[in-house]
Image (tube, grey):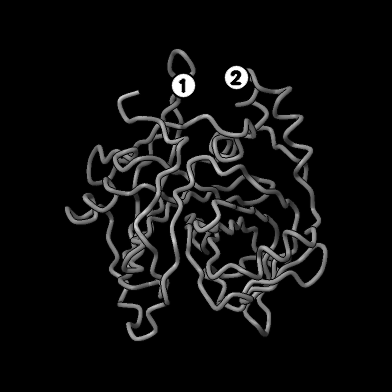
Amino acid sequence: MAAYNEGSLAVQTRVGVRDLAAHVGRSIGTGIRPIAAAFLELQPMLVLGAADADGRVWCSLLTGTPGFVRATGPHSISVAAPLPVPDGTPDGTPVGTIALDPRTRRRMRLNGLARPSARGFTVEAEQVFSNCPKYLQKRELYAPDTTTPAGTPHHGTALTPEQERFVSAADTFFIATVAPDGADASHRGGHPGFVRVDSPTELSWADYPGNAMFLTLGNLETDDRAGLLFLDWHTGTTVRLTGRAHTAYGPDGVRTTRFRIERTVETPSASPLRWSHPEYSPANPPLDS
């Protein structure tokens, strides 16, 4: 897989960062370095994005005892958890993953092909790279809640009033996108209120300046399917949304992504992990900017 697909190149050209993106793109490889392997083995959670059998894109949270995600070679990882979507094709399911550690504000992304395994599933890496700590809120990890089982998932086609309040108060969410060359999972962060609930079926947020890769926006240029994951860091409840997204380009470099909801899934206590209140990233722009 090339560092950038046609969609990402188109956005980079539009924004005028092709040279910078070419330089940053040299950090994208297919190999898992020892320092990256060590980082993965310390993580109690992994976010995964992929399309389901109906073609809907979802972003899901996987958790486990550190070591449940581990490198099994320079180009593969093993995950001791069920693959949250069907394997899709004999050649494997394209997935995007992101391992994010709020304790250290570090994150690592690995995209490739997933296949079921005796342990759970494996991913053959096609893209491996780290991101800067921009817009990552720092949190401490408390002891896991091992007594509260995950609740029954609640399905819908629009946000409930309580879910609207939850999304409006979020300082972090994850987004999954797809393209002909694979899938990707990424992170978005800001001060609470940076995600706007425009209606029970519509969200929007400003696209803050990042690393100039434009992997997410590039995928949306060619395929508007997307999945969002919101996490209650205190209770482990997740709200997953699938739908369609597009980016509007305004004057002075302002970009706004708009998301239309098609399906919702709320799962109480989906994660046993419990995190502290955040120390907000110093990179978070003020909301009135």
Q: In the displayed structure, does residue 34 sit left or right of residue 203? A: right
Can you give x and y, in whole percent of width and height, for residue 3 in the image?
Answer: 75, 40
Mark 1 lies on a secondary structure that is strand
Quarter of image, res 123: bottom right
Classify 10 Å Cα crowding around label 1: few (below 14), some (14-19), many (20 and above). some
Residue topped by disc 2: 14
Q: Nearer the viewer, residue 279 or 152?
A: 279
Vertical position of residue 81 compared to residue 13: above or below? below
Residue 7 horizontal/vertical position (percent): 63, 33
Q: Is 194 in front, or is 248?
A: 194
Q: CA distance from mark 1 to mark 2?
A: 9 Å
Of 157 and 77, the residue lying toward us? 77
Q: Say which quarter of the image contains residue 91.
A: bottom right
Count of numbered circles in the view: 2
* Mark 2 surroundings within 10 Å by alpha-carbon count, few (fewer than 14), some (14 through 19), many (20 or more): few
Q: Where 284 falls versus 119 (above or below)?
A: above
Inspect the image, locate mark 2, and give the three-letter code of the amino acid beneath it.
Answer: Arg
Q: Amino acid at mark 1?
A: Tyr
Q: Nearer the viewer, residue 226 or 213?
A: 213
Task: Give me the disc on residue 164.
Answer: none
Where is residue 221? Give x, y as percent. 56, 33
Is 257 situated above or below 54?
above
- Residue pictured at 33% horizontal, 58% vertical: 264
- Helix, strand or loop at label 2? It is helix
Q: Which residue is mark 1?
A: 249
Residue at 54 percent across and 51 percent down: it is 105
Contact (Cβ within 8 Å) of mark 1 with mark 2 = yes
Which label's residue is closer to the chain start, 1 or 2? 2
